[in-house]
Image: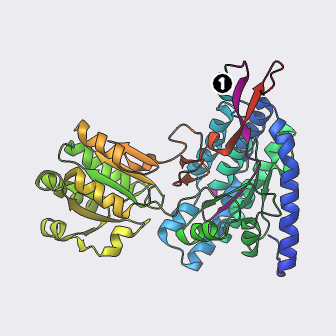
């Protein structure tokens, strides 16, 4: 990492990164699908070969994180192991195997005057990714942007700086193998926060879109200060509603997985809503299973009456993304009550309904306005890899351009190509 102490130095370094990224966009946009796939395969191989170096770097970041007193959920996102490194490499290979989006025809039609019009996918250009603690984002973002023909500028957090740098070395080696520009994937070489400000300002027009991946304070700053478009979500305040028609064993299995599989990811459930008509048949078994798995329950008065081990939920609990082994639980008056609660508190990320009643499921899907809705499945499936995207650069909860997992297709724009035979407009 560069030790940049003067703001002018940061500005100069970031401006040069922006110029290099912009220069890389044309050869990337013109690169053959086979060339990009070869680069991605080489990246995956380099990550496997470089696993010892990546783990050594990660050990230093983890030690520093312990010293800094980072939370358990933060440390979980930071930590790599052999399995997670293999998942990174496999994710890049999955992206390599995806159909190349660049140049694909999204729609085509012919006008009465004989004009033939096509809407064709094109790269966005230069994407800036600002992220915290998750070093795997380095690999996911670099690979996805390359597949979509984009240059990317990566700015990881100081907590994962060494790990991200080790992964970046592998990505650049893959670019070299394929003969692609090394500046296609750049890692900001400083942890100085002024670099983030430069990216949010757009690097003199070099950056086309910003993707933040991190905590609420980071994403809020990006959304407030960015002078370029942003794909973002503020938080993953995910709800699970269990209807009276839910199969009990399924409901128990799903809520334990949705909350406890990995508590520190944005798809982890944070609030459980239970149909009041199912309180006597479902509630106790679900809460006992959650408690046995190590989850703290914070319930409303109805829940406390039935499960005295719970702690009283405060109003802030319904608005909190815990990213920890804590779950807010409330009884509601059927699907009507569930929809009302979610409408009030949701961050519009991911919600799940557990029910066998088709009418309940239809209302949930039609009336809940969130990026991802699931029926009889864990919220932990809110992930681009699980959607078959090969990976994701993040999950967007806005409604413009991209929503839900941001994968290869969401990292493209389009243009219209009009073919004529001499037509003039009267």
Question: Which residue is at 65% across, 49% downward?
Answer: 140
Q: Is residue 277 left or right of residue 286?
A: left
The quadrant in which residue 190 appears is bottom right
| Position of residue 319 measured from the top left corner of the image (x, y, whole percent) | 38, 69
Eyeballing the image, is 389 above or below 66? Answer: above
> Would residue 26 be found to the left or right of residue 34 on screen?
right
Q: Nearer the viewer, residue 101 or 36?
A: 101
Residue 236 position, x and y percent, is 46, 59
**Residue 10 is one of the magenta-drawn residues:** no
Q: Which residue is mark 1?
A: 108
Q: Which residues are magenta?
A: 113-136
| x, y percent for residue 259 | 36, 57
- Note whether residue 289 is visible: no
Image quadrant assignment for residue 377: top left
Q: Is residue 197 above or below residue 383?
A: below
* Residue most extreme to the bottom: 6
| 208 or 29, nearer to the observer | 208
Question: Visible in this render: residue 287?
Answer: yes
């Amino acid at each position: 990492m560069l030790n940049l102490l003067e703001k002018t130095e940061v500005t100069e370094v970031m401006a040069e990164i922006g110029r290099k990224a912009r220069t890389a966009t044309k050869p990337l946009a013109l690169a053959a699908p086979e060339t990009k796939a070869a680069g991605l395969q080489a990246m995956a191989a380099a990550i496997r070969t470089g696993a010892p170096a990546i783990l050594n770097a990660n050990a230093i970041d983890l030690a520093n994180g312990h010293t800094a007193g980072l939370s358990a959920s933060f440390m979980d996102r930071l930590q790599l192991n052999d399995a997670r490194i293999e998942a990174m490499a496999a994710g890049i290979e999955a992206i390599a195997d995806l159909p190349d989006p660049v140049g694909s025809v999204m729609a085509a039609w012919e006008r009465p005057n004989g004009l033939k019009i096509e809407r064709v996918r094109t790269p966005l250009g230069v994407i800036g990714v600002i992220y915290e603690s998750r070093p795997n984002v380095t690999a996911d973002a670099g690979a996805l942007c390359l597949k979509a023909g984009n240059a990317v500028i990566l700015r990881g957090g100081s907590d994962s700086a060494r790990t991200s740098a080790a992964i970046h070395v592998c990505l650049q080696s893959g670019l070299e193998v394929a003969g692609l520009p090394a500046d296609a994937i750049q890692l900001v070489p400083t942890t100085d926060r002024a670099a983030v400000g430069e990216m949010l300002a757009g690097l003199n027009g070099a950056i086309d879109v910003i993707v933040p991946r991190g905590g609420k304070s980071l994403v809020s700053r990006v959304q407030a200060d960015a002078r370029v478009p942003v794909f973002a979500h503020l938080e993953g305040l995910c709800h699970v509603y269990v209807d009276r028609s839910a199969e009990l064993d399924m409901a128990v299995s799903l809520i334990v997985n949705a909350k406890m599989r990995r508590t520190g990811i944005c798809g982890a459930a944070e609030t459980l809503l239970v149909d009041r008509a199912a309180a006597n048949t479902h509630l106790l078994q679900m809460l006992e299973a959650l408690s046995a798995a190590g989850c703290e329950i914070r319930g409303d008065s109805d829940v406390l009456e039935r499960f005295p081990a719970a702690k009283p939920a405060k109003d802030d609990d319904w608005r909190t993304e815990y990213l920890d082994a804590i779950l807010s639980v409330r009884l509601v008056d059927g699907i009507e009550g569930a929809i009302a609660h979610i409408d009030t508190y949701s961050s519009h990320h991911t919600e799940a309904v557990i029910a066998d009643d088709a009418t309940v499921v239809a209302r949930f899907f039609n009336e809940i306005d969130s990026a991802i809705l699931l029926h009889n499945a864990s919220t932990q499936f809110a992930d681009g890899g699980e959607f078959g995207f090969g990976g994701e650069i993040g999950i967007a909860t806005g409604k413009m351009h991209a929503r839900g997992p941001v994968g290869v297709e969401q990292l493209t724009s389009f243009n219209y190509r009009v073919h004529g035979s001499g037509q003039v407009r009267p």
